[in-house]
Image (cartoon, rainbow, N blue to C red):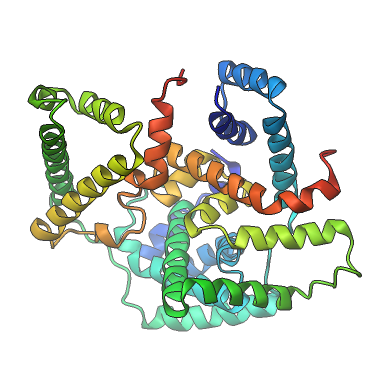
Amino acid sequence: MKCERARKLISDDIDGRLSGKRVEALERHIQSCAACRAYRGDVAIIQARSKAQPAPSLSPEDWARIERDLERELGRAPRARYRTALFPGIRLRLAWVGAAVLLVGAMVFYLTKSGSAGLDAAFLSYEGSLGRIYGETRDDPELADSFNRLVLADIGDTIRAGHSELPVDLLANPYFLEGWVGDTWDYRRDENGPDAP
Amino acid sequence: MNERMDDRNDEPLVDLARNGQPEAFMELVRRHRERIFAMIYGLTRDRADAEDLTQETFLTAYRALPRFRQKSSFYTWVYRIAVNTSLNFLKKRSREKGRATFDENVAAGDQATRAIPSPEETSVQSELEAKLAEAVEALPPLFKAAFLMVVNQGLSHAEAARILGCTENTVSWRMHKARKLLQAKMRPFLNEVGHEM
């Protein structure tokens, strides 16, 4: 096991997310790696110290003031009413379908350009295509990043162009599409790497 | 699910608030304000900003109540609004001041408001806590949000993922990255306390 992967597992272990087999693999690595042993000691101290920090709070007087301000604002706010939408979520689903179609299109574009992969790969399933691309880009972070940006840009353009009246503003959500960028890409690549279980 | 997330039944109050009874909403505010404030303060490290953002969070929630479909608990929903509101605020603040200036100001303000004693006066332990607070403050906002939720507020990765609108794996990855950054920053100070914890 590589140290980087061991340290990810150490983090999961602290948060109680590690299953039996992975705990065993981690412990084996820790026994043979002084650097990771020291790292685990460090993050254990950081964890304990962080948890021990007292929660910030306000005085009853401060809360009373905030409550008064809020009550005044609620008086001005439009009255909350139920609204029942016809076909709720359909437009949102259409946006996702559009995004998925473009994602596959982008994959085909990449595979065509890459030459070695060939068009056959375009007929793989979604998961299969993704796995293929992970494989192609594993050793080339720059290529992985470029591909990632291409996919993100396509999805963003589609949503902007075709679904400007979405019930929620997806692009204003700071978390939308976050799962595809930077770190998570590295994580997924790591998970699909040679030492993945 | 973490008991703290759904420990009281908010639904009757939510229904009353949706039907235009602000006093029912104020009761919901009283129930959850402490934890919402603690989370916002953890992200902003500024008491006045945290007060304003707490108020803004509840006001946004009140206005958005008709769209709240109760797929999650009221608390989870408001928590998500609080995190989004805070992150948008941080983004805006860093844009206005420039990242470097912002970091310097926050660190300086933090030191001043917490009245950290001089190195001569302080014990190794309290200095460590001050350094840790600075290191957490310097984390990228999304990593900091995950770290505060999981470590300080005791949420599971699943709960944090629901609030942040991402996958559990993304939370897990952010926790790993946050710990790595904290460990790198805290390494020079951790030798003094040792690994006895």
Comparing B66 with B20, the one in front is B66
Does residue B179 appear left or right of residue A34 in this picture? left
Image quadrant in which you'd find residue B109 = bottom right
Above-or-below relation of A82 to A4 = below
Residue drawn at x 74%, y 37% as measured from the top left: A41
Q: Position of residue A5 (x, y in %)?
A: 53, 30
Q: Which residue is drawn at the image coordinates 24% and 26% (left, top)?
A: A132
In the image, is B99 to the left or to the right of A150? Answer: right
- Could you tell whether B172 is left or right of A96 in the image? right
Q: Which picture quadrant has residue B197?
A: top right
Question: Measured from the top left, where is residue B108 in percent x and y?
Answer: 66, 76
In the rendered view, does A39 fall on the left or right side of A69?
Answer: right
In the foreground, B76 or A17: A17
Q: Quadrant of residue A192?
A: top left
Residue A88 appears in view: no
Q: Is residue A85 above or below residue B167?
A: below
